[in-house]
Every structure is written in C-alpha cells, then in structure tokens.
Amino acid sequence: MTPRANFDSNFYDVDTGEEFWMSGPKRDRTDGRYSNQQPLVDDDARAAYESFLACAPLPGRETG
C-alpha cells in the first residue's frame, strides 16, 4: 500500500491511491468542505439524493 501524504482526507481509492474528502449529504446543500461547490451526484444515486433534499430519510436511516 502506498503511504498516504494528505492527513486531511478521510477516504482514498485503494487502486489509485487518490485521496479525497467525502461529506455526508446536507439538506442545505453545503456538502463541500472548504467551498460552496455543489457535490457531484452519480446518476444511480440521484433519485435518493433528491428525495433526501425534499426531506425524505436517507436509505437505511429511515428510523434515525
């Protein structure tokens, strides 16, 4: 495994070693860590994300 250089990431790709920060979704759309940049949402997750923004619970967290 390649040593990780960035102490500020919370995930990394095991194949490429690329490091990144992943935030949980927020209904006020402030998902970015250090900017107001909107998140990239994969097409297969878009319906669940848009439902969450409309106040539906996240899949798997229906009871909290």
Image (cartoon, rainbow, N blue to C red):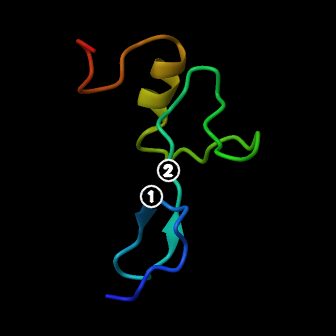
For discs 1 and 2, the disc positioned in front in the rendered view? 1
Estimate the x, y position of residue 39 in percent, counting from the top left: 62, 43
Q: Quadrant of the N terminus?
A: bottom left
Q: Residue at x 36, y 81 (%)?
A: 15
Instruction: Write down the quadrant of residue 13 in the picture.
Output: bottom left
Residue placed furthest toward the bottom: 2
Instruction: Provide the secondary structure element on which disc 1 rests.
Output: loop
Q: Residue furthest right?
A: 36
Q: Earlier in the sequence, mark 1 or mark 2?
A: 1
Above/below status of 19 relative to 40: below
Tell me where residue 21 appears, x and y as whole percent.
53, 56
The residue pinned by badge 1 equals 10
Q: Which mark is residue 22?
A: 2
Task: Inspect the image, locate mark 2, and give the three-letter code of the amino acid beneath it.
Answer: Met
Q: Are marks 1 and 2 in contact (CB under 8 Å)?
A: yes
Looking at this rendering, what residue extends furthest in the front direction? 7
Mark 2 surroundings: few (<14), some (14-19) or many (≥20) residues within 10 A: some
Residue type, numbered disc 1? Asn
Question: Badge 1: how crowded within 10 Å, few (<14), some, or many (20+)?
Answer: few
| Whole-percent x, y for residue 3 in the image | 41, 86
Indicate left or right for 29 with 18 as reference.
Answer: right
Q: Residue at x 50, y 76 (%)?
A: 18
At x 39% / y 89%, what residue is drawn? 2
Give percent across and percent down for residue 33. Answer: 64, 45
